[in-house]
C-alpha cells in the first residue's frame, strides 16, 4: 500500500472507474469467445458473420448492463442507495487493522 491515505469505504454511486470498463470488456469478450467456441463445435465449422452478429450484439448489451449496474451501486455495494459516509485512514493505520483482522481470521 504505497498510498499515504485510503478512503474507507471507496467511492461509489454514479462513478465509474477505468477498471470497471476493463472488467466489463473482459467479461463480455469472454462470453463472446465461449459462444463462438460452442457454435464452432456444434456446427463443426467456423460461423459466418451473420451467425456471429447476434453474439456481438449480446456482448454490447452485457457490457452496457454491467457498466450500468456498477454506476448504480454505492460505495458499500447497495444498488440505487445513497453513498455511505467515508473515513480517511492513514495507510499505516489501515495496514495495522488489516494485519489484525488477518490474524484473527487465521487464528
Image: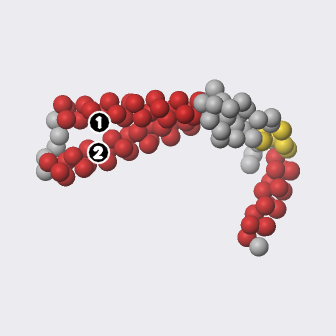
Dot 1 or dot 2: first in sequence order is 2
Q: Which corner quadrant of the image does residue 26 belong to?
A: top left
Q: Is residue 8 left or right of residue 78?
A: right
Task: Identify the residue at horizontal 63%, vertical 31% (top origin).
Answer: 80
Task: Identify the residue at horizontal 63%, vertical 26% (top origin).
Answer: 14
Q: Which corner quadrant of the image does residue 83 belong to?
A: top right
Secondary element at image label 1: helix
Secondary element at image label 2: helix
Give the camera-side residue of 1 and 19: 19
Label tally: 2
**How far across and down, in percent of the image, does residue 86 sit?**
80, 36
Q: Is residue 71 above or below residue 99?
A: above
Q: Residue furthest top?
A: 14
Q: Which residue is mark 1?
A: 55
From the image, which quarter does the C terminus lie in?
Answer: bottom right
Task: Identify the residue at horizontal 33%, vertical 41% (top origin).
Answer: 32
Give the camera-side residue of 30 and 70: 70
**How far across and down, in percent of the image, does residue 28 sit?**
41, 39
**How far across and down, in percent of the image, does residue 31 sit?**
36, 44
Q: Is residue 84 left or right of residue 34?
A: right
Q: Label for residue 101? A: none
Q: Which residue is mark 2?
A: 35
Question: How packed is label 1: few (under 14 Cα within 10 Å), some, or many (20 or more)?
Answer: some
Amino acid at each position: 500500500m504505497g498510498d499515504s491515505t485510503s478512503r474507507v469505504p471507496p467511492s461509489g454511486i454514479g462513478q465509474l472507474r477505468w477498471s470497471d470498463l476493463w472488467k466489463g470488456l473482459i467479461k463480455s469478450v469472454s462470453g463472446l469467445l465461449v459462444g463462438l467456441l460452442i457454435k464452432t463445435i456444434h456446427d463443426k465449422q467456423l460461423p459466418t458473420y451473420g451467425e456471429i452478429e447476434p453474439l456481438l450484439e449480446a456482448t454490447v448489451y452485457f457490457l452496457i448492463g454491467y457498466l450500468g449496474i456498477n454506476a448504480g451501486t454505492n460505495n458499500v455495494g447497495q444498488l440505487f442507495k445513497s453513498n455511505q459516509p467515508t473515513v480517511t485512514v492513514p495507510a499505516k493505520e489501515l495496514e495495522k487493522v488489516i494485519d489484525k483482522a488477518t490474524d484473527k481470521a487465521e487464528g
